Image (tube, rainbow, N blue to C red):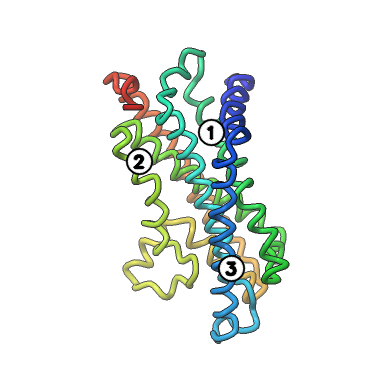
Amino acid sequence: MKFYRIYALFLRHLYLIKSSFPRLLDLIYWPTIQIILWGFISKFFTMHSDFYNHTAGIILSAAILYDFLFRSSISFNMLFLEEIWSRNFTNLFIAPLKVSEIITSLTATALIRTLIGIIPAVLLVFPFFGVSLLNLGPTLGLLLFSLYMFGITLGLLVVSGLLRYGPAFENVAWSSLFLLAPLGCIYYPLSILPDWLQVLAKALPLVYIFEEVRSILLNNIVNYKNIASALILNLTYFTLSIFVFYSAFSEARKKGTLMNVGE
């Protein structure tokens, strides 16, 4: 794996962002509007709900973390879709790029895109609503890392579908996280779900992440078992997603569909 090749691909997408005001505005606009909206909803529930009474920012903190996850996944997908829409994907292989280098570059660039979108929104919530993610303490770094891993995992699976089925699979890029959100227990505890759904939900790292967020903010208790469970599941799914991506890429190359991936 050559760093300069990874860096070159990283720069390509960074220049696209820097040179396009609409792209930059899109990265910042949606997270900011969504988090401000959830801020007012959170404030309402704080004032009228016994469960969240005197504990401001639980819903808003969950909304910010979920948006970080969503931006991580969608940023990875968008970077790949940029190559498809511009019909540039096959051109990348004029250089001796490896699949591992493409994954590494897209993962790093997706983080930059995510931070560009989420940081302005996070900075607004404290003066507007008095909420700070720093209330989660030192575990915040582990929670963000776990969310980012899961976002990239979903991104890899969606990109694998794009390689296998072509641009027709594009709609899944936008809906994948929404399909998992009800089981992720983002805004409510796991106990709300029916018993049979709880079994399915426990297979998702999201459950352990957001249960931990509520545990810290409501009870000021850090449960490292939740954090460990989330990290183990993320590592397992991430490894599986890399295998799926390599399989989809190999299959597309054998069938010659890589040449038509932008059609």
Q: Nearer the viewer, mark 1 or mark 2?
A: 2
Of the residues under marks 2 and 3, which one precedes in the sequence?
Answer: 3
The residue carrying mark 2 is 170
For label 3, the SS is helix
| Residue 247 in the image: above or below residue 115 | above
For label 2, the SS is helix
The quarter of the rendered structure image containing the C terminus is: top left
> What's the residue at 44%, 56% (across, down)?
204
> What's the residue at 35%, 35% (across, down)?
162
Camera-side residue of 224 and 39: 39
For residue 106, the mark is 1
Answer with the quarter of the image where residue 90 lies.
top left
> What's the residue at 56%, 55% (across, down)?
31
Of the residues under marks 1 and 2, which one precedes in the sequence?
Answer: 1
Q: Amino acid at mark 2?
A: Glu
Residue 177, image x and y in percent?
42, 53
Residues marked 3 and 1 touching at CB (< 8 Å) = no
For label 1, the SS is helix
Binning the other alpha carbons within 10 Å of mark 2 as few (below 14), some (14 to 19) or many (20 upward) gives some
Camera-side residue of 90 and 62: 90
Residue 13, image x and y in percent?
56, 31
Residue 176, image x and y in percent?
38, 50
The residue carrying mark 3 is 60
Inter-mark Cα distance, 3 to 1:
29 Å
